Amino acid sequence: MKQSGEAAASSSFDDSPIAREIADLSARRRALEAAKVELSGRTRVFTVSNQKGGVGKTTTAVNIAAALVSVGARVLVIDLDPQGNASTALGVAHNAETPSVYDVLIDEFPLADIVQESPESPNLLCAPSTIHLAGAEIELVSQVAREHRLRGALRDYLAAADTTHLDFVIIDCPPSLGLLTINAFTAADEVMIPIQCEYYALEGLSQLLGSVQMIQKHLNPGLHVSTILLTMYDGRTRLAQQVADEVRSHFTHEVLRTVIPRSVRVSEAPSFGQTVIAYDGQSAGAIAYREAAVEIVARDTTKKGS
């Protein structure tokens, strides 16, 4: 009878939601280990943008960057947000005395002079933000070629003989459409939009798409929205599924299959100066970001071959 009871308890655990979740994560880890990632050999420049706040924009930027590094890419994150949260998450110095993106935009420092390696990996680089960047919006107004400052600096950096090849550049910009964000749009080829799976998720998106069209028309014809990532997904709620379905119906080709779940580990990681990939690489959030990274790389190689 005792054995029968233990067997029943074991069977009950095997059918429990926790057991199913553990089994699912294990299967996804194995799939990631078996995935073949082929980088295109060109440098893809993304700006991560959403004019609606609180959607996981910076979290997406740094964790996608770290996830891309984990599958073999070399990545530069440009922190264009005066709050400097991306710099914090990547563990790089960004106090007031640190050479930063401000010096590149205002004083025409070479980008190479400010780029730092993240402690996480020599293949994860960061051009940090400092508090000085808060005044850059005003100072840029009187500058020559004010919308192209970052584009020119990045072009020179990528062309320099002593710059090791980069597979990705990811620009994290402020939630507002000012000159900093315009510099990001002008420097990038692709826009990545994180969308929170909650009510009003699409609010402000039409404004963002309008901004992208304006930049395409006047400053950067090659800019396009290539990637939409659903974040903060809670599979237990009907609302999250409804939002995901609505976004997919509007943006069939741009939305990644991967969704990023709500995750305590993802929220905790920045307070330790780390991405979730370094903080807890086996967590559900880390696995989801790595899956998204594999998908982003695969989409490019597919497009290239078509």
Image (cartoon, rainbow, N blue to C red):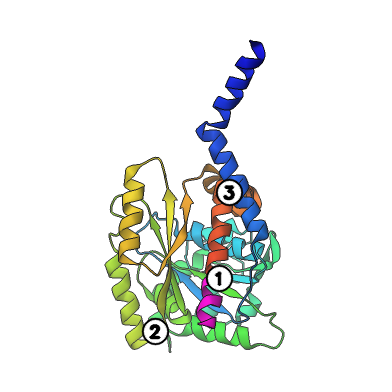
How far is the residue under mark 3 from the one under mark 1? Answer: 27 Å
Q: Which residue is mark 1?
A: 298
Q: Nearer the viewer, residue 224 or 100?
A: 224
Of circles 3 and 1, the one toward us is: 1
> Range of the magenta residues?
299-306
The residue beneath circle 3 is 269
Residue drawn at x 47%, y 65% as measured from the top left: 81
Query: Overall secondary structure of the magenta stretch?
Result: helix
Q: Amino acid at mark 1?
A: Ala
Q: Position of residue 73 (x, y in %)?
A: 65, 70
SS class of the residue under badge 1?
helix
The residues bearing labels 1 and 2 have C-alpha atoms spaced at a distance of 42 Å
Q: Is residue 263 left or right of residue 28?
A: left
Q: Position of residue 94 (x, y in %)?
A: 59, 63
Residue 106 visible in image: no
Residue picked out by circle 2 = 142
Rendered position, 214 above or below 196: below
The amino acid type of the residue labelled 3 equals Ala
